[in-house]
Image: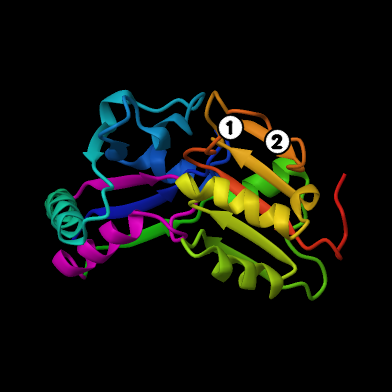
Amino acid sequence: MSGHFYGVGVGVTPGSLSVAAWRALQSADLIYAPRSKVSGTSVALAMLDGLELDASKIREVEFNMDGDGPRLKSFYLQLAQKIAAELEAGKRVAYLTIGDSMTYSTYGYLLYALREVAPDAPRTTFPGMTSYATAASLLEFSLGEEKERTLVLPCPDDMEALRREIEAHEVVALMKIGHRFPEVLALLRDMNLLEYCALASRLGLPEQRLLHGLNDFPQGFERPGYLSVLLIRKANERRFT
């Protein structure tokens, strides 16, 4: 194939795109920007606000992350086939993905499908800044010092399992909390850890909120929402201010 495929991690805050990724986007003939069916705009595309890109290159792709495996596989297989045809025609095609390309990213589904339909297609994947690294920087929360054990964890349904993970690590970056948030707060309160936690909610979006410590948690804040990370540090370790 004479074309080239670029997977581009755009981070979770506008302006965090790497220089190498930006150069790839500038050279691309087409740029795919995923957009959820429940959203009016592409969050990944919003991370490029302020950068000058030719709007005629951009193609928004609507998807539904409902957890249905066969439906997701079918969706990304069809998209991969379309991209493969464009690569065959010699086009440079980029696909935007929120956060980091290879960390809890739907980009992985597309990459697997593209390998299946066009295994010899030239590909380059650019990393992006993860949500937990961004949250840590904004909150000035160390994710690990010396030989501390740090765990990045999608929130489990079983709070006792979460308790064991917290007990086994000095630092935990908890993702995908959603409706479990009240239970997580109750667990952290029981473990006397609320003052050692920090929360970044809706990272990079207009309603972004940063909370240092959770002892005085705002009333009515029942769930942190999309692009949110809870950072937990054990009480017997260094406190942040």
Query: Could you say where residue 200 lies in the image, as x and y percent from the top left?
Result: 63, 40
Q: Which residue is mark 1?
A: 221
Q: Is residue 28 above or below residue 104?
A: above
- The reply to whether discs 2 and 1 touch (Cβ–Cβ < 8 Å) is yes
Quadrant of residue 147 in the image?
Answer: bottom right
Locate residue 155, reporting x and y percent: 51, 58
Q: Which residue is mark 2?
A: 217
Mark 1, residues whose alpha carbon is within 10 Å: few (<14), some, or many (≥20)? few
91 lies left or right of 190: left
Q: Is residue 60 left or right of residue 70?
A: right
Q: Is residue 129 visible?
A: no
Q: Is residue 144 above or below residue 11?
A: below
The image quarter containing residue 105 is bottom left
**Label 2: which secondary element:** loop
Q: Amino acid at mark 1?
A: Phe
Q: In the drawing, what numbered circle is on residue 186? A: none
SS assignment at label 1? loop
Query: Residue at 58% across / 28% down in the picture?
Result: 220
Q: What percent of the width, then of the height, locates residue 90?
A: 18, 50
Q: Is residue 187 left or right of residue 140?
A: left
- Quarter of the image that includes the N terminus: bottom left
The part of the chain drawn in magenta is 90-119
Position of the C terminus by quadrant: top right
Tell me the residue at 71%/64% (across/down): 171
Q: Position of residue 144 (x, y in %)?
A: 76, 64
Name the residue located 77 percent from the left edge and 72 percent from the top edge: 148
Q: Is residue 101 magenta?
A: yes
Which residue occupies 63% across, 46% down? Answer: 134
Q: Would you say residue 12 is visible in this rendering?
A: yes
Query: In the depicted view, which residue is nearer to us: 159 or 230?
Result: 159
Cα separation, mark 2 vs mark 1, equals 8 Å
**Amino acid tagged 2:** Phe
